[in-house]
Image: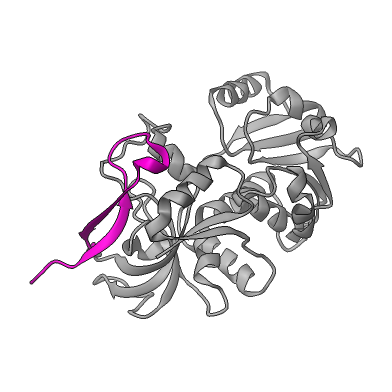
Amino acid sequence: MAVKLMRTVQYDSYGGGAVGLKHVEVPVPTPDKDEVLLKLEATSLNPLDLRFQNGVNRPFVTRKFPVIPGTDVAGEVVEVGSSVVKFKAGDKVVAILNLLIGGGLAEYAVAKESFAVPRPENVSAAEGACLPIAALTAHKALVDVAGIKLDGSGPRMNILVTAASGGVGHYAVQLAKLGNTHVTGTCGARNIDFVKSLGADEVLDYKTPEGAALKSPSGQKYDAVVHCAKYIPWSTFEPNLSESGKVIDLTPGPSAICTYVFQKLTLSKKQLLPFILIPKGDKELNLLVRLVKEGKFKTVVDSKHPLSKAQDAWAKMIDGHATGKIIVEQ
């Protein structure tokens, strides 16, 4: 029997950027007993994909080449493993693929049953594919670390979201506003109205003196910061924090780790907390899909690109100024 092939986009060494991506045909994967085979409809890109390509996470995360990047997908189940009970052929799902293997820039991919959730009819493939890494990161930062109650039952908190118009940031603003919060966001001048439309109470242009200083226009101190941007030192955050304020750093570098250790040793009430997302199952992803279905939460798509032009999507991600999420459609 002839092996069925599929179109993919992959890279075979670290670095290379968009030109390092190559279009090849490889065999369609076979699902293990606890996996589903998906015919992909949409894949969203994340900065994490670029970090993997650049080898930033070595030696902690090694990759076997060639690599088909992409972890956040939506598609239709075409085959199920022998132990799968939640899904059957024909089901529409949203899934997060193995972070170490990827597989999203392809016509087909396999996903663990435990990391896939049903996709309702009124949630598009693009909307669903945007959720896994970016929205889960925002959710865990706000709920698990900052302690926000999404039903509004918690104490009032002042929240700052840096890079509020980006993939994680635009989700963080919306999720924070489901709680009992006052939200300040930072972004470029062209996105101020956009961030306000997400529900932010105050918006700072990060290129102005006030924005660069992160000072709330109303003078409020931040109880928690969802820090999605880069290159902002602790000394800028510290005077703007409440007595026990936290900065949840989603892109921690060596200086962030050193600051975290120093604060632990000195028992500082104000803290910088390096954050790394480790998906643990489908519970939170199910919640996020349901919020989209109910119209309480939305995905903003910056741009869509066909698989044949995945390099264009990759280049736009490298540029770093996307408003919302970048999608590759299969």
Q: Describe residue 12's horizontal placement relative to residue 324 as left or right.
A: left
Start and end of the magenta stretch? 1-29
Q: Describe residue 237's horizontal placement relative to residue 5 as left or right.
A: right
Q: Is residue 316 above or below residue 251?
A: below
Does residue 14 show up magenta in the picture? yes
Q: Which quarter of the image is occupied by the C terminus?
A: bottom left
Is 80 or 302 nearer to us in this picture?
302
Does residue 149 show up magenta in the picture? no
Q: Describe residue 8's horizontal placement relative to residue 292 as left or right.
A: left
Q: Which residue lies furthest to the right in this view?
A: 218
How many circles with numbers are drawn on the protein? 0
Q: In this view, does 95 lie above or below 19?
A: below
Q: Residue at horizontal 53%, vertical 23%? A: 254
Occupied quadrant, residue 7: bottom left
Q: Describe residue 103's horizontal placement relative to residue 282 as left or right.
A: left
Q: In this view, does 34 lie above or below 22?
A: below
Q: Where is residue 327 in the image (x, y as percent from the top left)?
A: 50, 59
Q: Which quarter of the image is occupied by the N terminus?
A: bottom left
Q: Residue at horizontal 43%, vertical 75%? A: 92
Q: Residue furthest left?
A: 1
